[in-house]
Image (cartoon, helix red, strand yellow):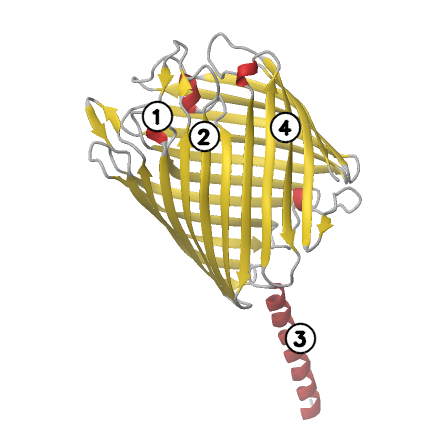
């Protein structure tokens, strides 16, 4: 072979290699868009379009719905059924600037019980957010938010309240600092949250105090990732948290503090493989230490995992798992270990019809007591996009809770079935 031919072939091979590398880098080492989830797939004929208001692109919708619930109080005996009408709206707006961004989100929903009017409630949320692009690789972000919410009847604390679901407010702020350059990505956040719970009333007409749950929380999180290839990255992450309660609680004749400090450290992988799987998995160690030695510290395995499998272009299967420490509102047990597993499937029957199903289990192991809750939830739904302005959904879901433990008061186990239909209207 002549030198000219060798040089020509070598040049062609080098150009091909450079093109492949450039293509991979142009897509980004953290692009995860080889496969398209059913719920994420664009349907221009049926998807609502944002409305331009000056420099903002606004997405909004109104929602109407009817739900039949066969056990509205989530009790094991004397079950009561009702029909709930739901109405509300939500809006989200973001600037379309080439750099930086400002936006806001707001929602308001009301649930009206037809026979048990005292159960009716409204939820309100609001959030203002922004992002400053310092450079192509580094950005700063922040948000402030306020929410007025109601804990569902099936939550632990509502087993002791009869007049209405427990209402609470959340306010706070979050700051972000993110860096990404070639193979390295570093994501950081710091947040402050205040939670204030309203008191309830027991079946006997007595006050169900919730002041012991009022608290302020600060937390910081960081994840450092390195992309081994455009399809696979490894990372290490950590978080620290501090919970300070507004007041002490009287327990066993002594004032006790629920204040605590905690941390989590973990390592994991983020990937999108040619085997039609995309995921993010972190496994590590969690620890929570109480300021008051009366309460036991909590430590153990931490898990945070999300997987997507794409068996066909028309079907997406989701898996998730998590293990963390939570405060469920138990007076004599400030912490519980929550372990969750879930799976779901979305299938595009037609371009504008999506069928979905899901199932999940969650267990709660309470500290300071031998109580253990086993929760099961499963359901199915069908979404019909009539056109860009009108979307329908029908659904059925079932929730069950099984409670065990020698110190459990009464029987907080329950089973609850719901069926409903909803309508979303877009401008």
Q: Position of residue 205 (x, y in %)?
A: 39, 11
- Mark 2 = which residue? 168
- Quadrant containing the C terminus is top right
What residue is shown at x 46% (from left), y 33% (from top)? 169
Whether 30 is drawn above or below 114: the answer is: below
Q: Nearer the N terminus, badge 3 or badge 2?
A: 3
* Residue ID for mark 4: 380
Going by the image, does 294 lie left or right of 83? left
* Picture coordinates of residue 231, whole percent (x, y): 56, 59
Left or right: 324, with 423 as reference point: left
- Residues under numbered marks 4 and 2 in contact, where contact means CB atoms less than 8 Å apart: no
Q: Please tell me which of labels 4 and 3 falls first in the chain.
A: 3
- Quick one: SS at disc 1? loop
| CA–CA distance in space, label 1 to label 4 | 32 Å
Label 4 vs label 3: CA separation?
A: 48 Å
Instruction: Give 281 or 177, whichever is nearer the viewer.
Output: 177
- Tell me which label, 1 or 3, sits earlier in the chain: 3
Residue 252 seen in this snapshot: yes
| Residue position marked by numbered label 1 in the rendering | 330
- Residue found at x 72% / y 47%: 50
């Amino acid at each position: 072979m002549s030198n000219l031919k060798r040089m020509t072939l070598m040049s062609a091979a080098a150009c091909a290699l450079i093109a492949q590398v450039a293509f991979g880098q142009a897509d980004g080492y953290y692009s995860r868009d080889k496969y398209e989830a059913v719920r994420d797939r664009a349907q221009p004929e049926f998807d609502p379009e944002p409305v331009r208001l000056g420099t903002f692109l606004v997405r909004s919708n109104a929602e109407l719905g009817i739900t039949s619930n066969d056990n509205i109080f989530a009790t094991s005996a004397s079950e009561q059924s009702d029909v709930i009408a739901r109405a509300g709206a939500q809006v989200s707006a973001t600037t379309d600037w080439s750099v930086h961004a400002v936006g806001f989100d707001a929602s308001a929903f009301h649930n009206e019980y037809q026979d048990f009017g005292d159960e009716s409630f409204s939820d309100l949320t609001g959030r203002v957010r922004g992002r400053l692009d310092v450079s192509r690789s580094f950005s700063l972000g922040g948000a402030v938010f306020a929410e007025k919410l109601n804990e569902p009847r099936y939550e632990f604390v509502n087993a002791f309240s009869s007049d209405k679901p427990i209402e609470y407010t959340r306010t706070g702020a979050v700051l972000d600092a993110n860096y990404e350059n070639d193979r390295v990505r570093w994501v950081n956040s710091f947040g402050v949250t205040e939670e204030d719970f309203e008191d309830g009333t027991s079946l006997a007409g007595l006050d169900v105090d919730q002041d012991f749950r009022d608290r302020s929380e600060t937390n910081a999180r960081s994840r450092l990732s390195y992309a081994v290839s455009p399809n696979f990255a490894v990372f290490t992450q950590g978080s620290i948290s501090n919970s300070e309660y507004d007041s002490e609680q009287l327990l066993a004749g002594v004032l006790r503090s629920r204040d605590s400090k905690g941390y989590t450290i973990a390592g994991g992988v983020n990937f999108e493989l040619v085997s039609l799987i995309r995921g993010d998995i972190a496994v590590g160690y969690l620890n929570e230490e109480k300021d008051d030695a009366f309460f036991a510290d909590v430590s153990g395995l931490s898990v945070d995992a999300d997987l997507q499998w794409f068996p066909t272009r028309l079907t997406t299967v989701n898996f998730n798992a998590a293990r963390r420490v939570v405060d469920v509102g138990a007076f004599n047990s400030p912490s519980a270990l929550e372990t969750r597993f879930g799976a779901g499937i979305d299938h595009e029957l037609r371009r504008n019809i999506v069928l979905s199903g899901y199932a999940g289990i969650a267990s709660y192991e309470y500290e300071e007591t031998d109580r253990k809750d086993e929760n099961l939830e499963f359901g199915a739904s069908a979404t019909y996009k009539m056109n860009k302005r009108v979307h329908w959904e029908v659904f059925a879901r079932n929730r069950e809770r099984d409670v065990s433990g020698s110190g459990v008061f009464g029987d907080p186990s329950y089973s609850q079935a719901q069926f409903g239909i909803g309508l979303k209207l877009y401008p």
